[in-house]
Amino acid sequence: MKRRILFKLFFYICAGIVIPCKLYALDITVGATTWYAWGSRFENVQKESSRENKSYSFDPTFLYGPVLSVKFNDDFNLTFVYLYGKFDYEEKIYSDAGGSYFAESKAVRSDSDLALNYRLNDYFKVFAGVKYMAYEFRLSFDNFNRGYCDNHSKHTSIGPGLGLSSTLPITKNIFFLATLSGFYLYSAGEKFEDNRMYGSRPVNLTIGYNEYGINSTIAIAYYIAPASAVISLGGRFQYFIIDYNKYEPFLINNIRNQIYGITLTATYTFSL
């Protein structure tokens, strides 16, 4: 219900801006972006009478996808960015029951932002919109004391975001770009399956949660005037917390995630 209300509100706001501008030319920007990213996550899980602290790190990987911007007039433009990638995690688990062990995980991740931007002046814009994040996560390990375990979860969330962006000229064709935004996402629940084998029964749950965090980017952009193109190189940092509801047979507390890396984007602009 919250997701439907959010989309309807965003649609009506955009329509109220686009309709008065229908007689004017639209500037369309299309392109592609990539994010060479690495990072980590930390979670705390209470299982029956023992507590486990899990720390994940993953090898650097590429996320990639399209970018789109539609400029309605001098004050408003709509932007869309979608990123997709696959991660290989190495997990180290410390247990109060004794010892520690490693596990391997794989995740497929999607990250998307749709935002309406408003120009404050020549250098700053504010923006508000909708953020979507999703991943499928699979964890497996084989420990002599605990047996074989195969976990699989599907995680999707969507919600509002709000932020500030800046474009500062360095020379005629070179610019400094920066953004900072926050978001709060809702979910109908994460589907979690734990297909245990040696003595433990399988677990199949839908776990409720909300997540919130920040995005920040900085980049240097070069405008190629004859080609109406822009190439930018920079960095991006994302930090977010997942707050889970409490479920048996284990209690998942919040999970802290951080992803950071190098970004490269190329775009082309034309008018309709």
Image (spheres, grey):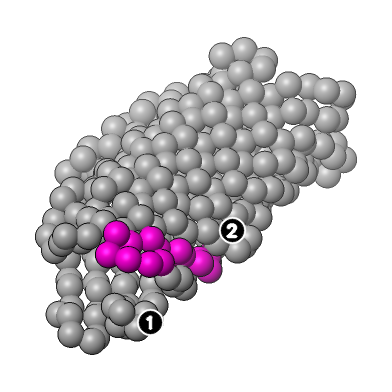
For label 2, the residue is 63
Q: How far across and how far down the image is residue 192, in percent?
A: 24, 66
Residue at 61% over, 42% down: 236
Tell me the quarter of the picture where residue 93 sits.
Answer: bottom left
Principal secondary structure, stretch drawn in magenta: strand
Q: Label 2 to label 1, Cα distance in Å?
A: 30 Å
Q: How far across and how far down the image is residue 131, in percent?
A: 41, 42
131 or 59: nearer the eye?
59
- Residue 166, label in figure: none
Mark 1, residues whose alpha carbon is within 10 Å: few (<14), some, or many (≥20)? Answer: some
Q: Is residue 15 visible?
A: no
**192 on left or right of 17:** left
Magenta extent: 86-100
Tag 1 secondary structure: strand
Residue at 64% over, 48% down: 261
Q: How far across and how far down the image is residue 34, in percent?
A: 65, 54
Give the residue furthest to the left.
248
215 or 132: nearer the eye?
215
Instruction: Name the quadrant of the C terminus.
Output: top right
Tag 2 secondary structure: strand
Q: Is residue 93 magenta?
A: yes
Residue at 35% over, 55% down: 53
**207 on left or right of 41:** left
71 or 216: nearer the eye?
216
Q: Mark 2 or mark 1: which is in front? A: 1
Q: How far across and how far down the image is residue 153, in percent?
A: 31, 66
Instruction: Name the quadrant of the N terminus.
Output: top left
- Residue 142, label in figure: 1
Among the two numbered marks 2 and 1 on one chain, the one whose residue lies closer to the N terminus: 2
Q: Is residue 22 magenta?
A: no
